[in-house]
Image (cartoon, grey):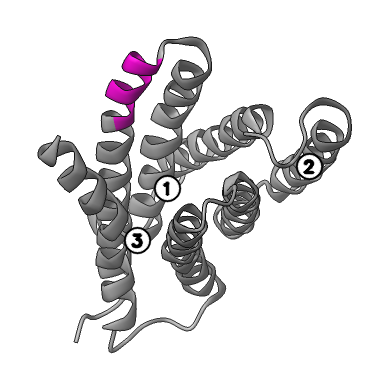
Amino acid sequence: MPGLKILIYVSIFSVFLPITFLFRKSKMPENSLTKALGLLLIISPITDLINYTLGKIEMPSLIVANLCFILQFLLLNYIFTLLLSNKKIVYTGALLFVIFTLYNFLRIQNFTEYQDWPYVTGSIMLLTYSLLYMWQLIIAPPAQNIWQFSPFWINTAVLWYFSLFLMINYVFKNFSTEIAMVVWVFHNINNIVKNILLAVGIYYSGEIK
């Protein structure tokens, strides 16, 4: 279907919206948050390019997808160590995730398979961090307008994306291929919205050229 193919391409290339904002900042704060966010964004197109190349030469690409998720989780985990006042819960979450992922790889699922358990575990942890940060903003709101507060938008992107990611992951594993393909449309829309929210967060982190 042409419409579905267009949506897939829009989803893939939507990451270049926040990346463009990131590289067009004339007053980009040189801090750990924006550096980690920049690295997180760059991972996505690199992964897509590798997956596309592997698909062309008919080689399995799940190893790349699994490794990409681990890197994304660790980068987001680091970002939440910068945002949350209670950093112990984030450090503990990262340690538990690494231990569980290694156990899953050694005893449950080979790394060449779709690592659904680490995906679910990591998503739940990120959602927990995100909700904790929302609560932190409620009890100690920022001095500036929250709608112009960059971390609010970045956190909202995480909350939006991974709440739907959990549902999509469940459908892929438990429903028919036809239903899974329909849900994949929602995944693409979900990804587009996430990148728009990240772009807004980057926009409010400094001045655009």
Q: Which mark is residue 150?
A: 3
For mark 2, give the secondary structure: helix
Badge 2 crowding class, 10 Å Cα cut-off, few under 14, some 14 to 19, many 20 or more, is: few
Check disc 1 and give the amino acid type: Asn
185 sits to left or right of 135: left
Label 3 to label 2: alpha-carbon separation: 26 Å
Label 2 to label 1: alpha-carbon separation: 19 Å
Q: Is residue 22 above or below residue 101?
A: below
Q: Which mark is residue 155?
A: 1
For mark 1, give the secondary structure: helix
Q: Residue at x 29, y 67 (%)?
A: 16
Check disc 2 and give the amino acid type: Thr
The answer to whether one can see residue 104 in this image is yes
Q: Position of residue 4 (x, y in %)?
A: 18, 37
Q: Is residue 28 above or below residue 12?
A: below
Q: Which of 128/185 is in front?
A: 185
Q: Which of 114/191 is in front?
A: 114
**Mark nearer the N terminus (3 vs 2):** 2
Label 1 to label 3: alpha-carbon separation: 9 Å
Q: Residue at x 81, y 45 (%)?
A: 95
Q: Which mark is residue 56?
A: none
Q: Which mark is residue 92?
A: 2
Q: Position of residue 66 (x, y in %)?
A: 63, 45
The answer to whether one can see residue 146 in this image is no
**Mark nearer the N terminus (1 vs 3):** 3
Seen as rendered, the residue at the extreme front is 57
Q: Which residues are magenta?
A: 177-184
**Mark nearer the N terminus (2 vs 1):** 2
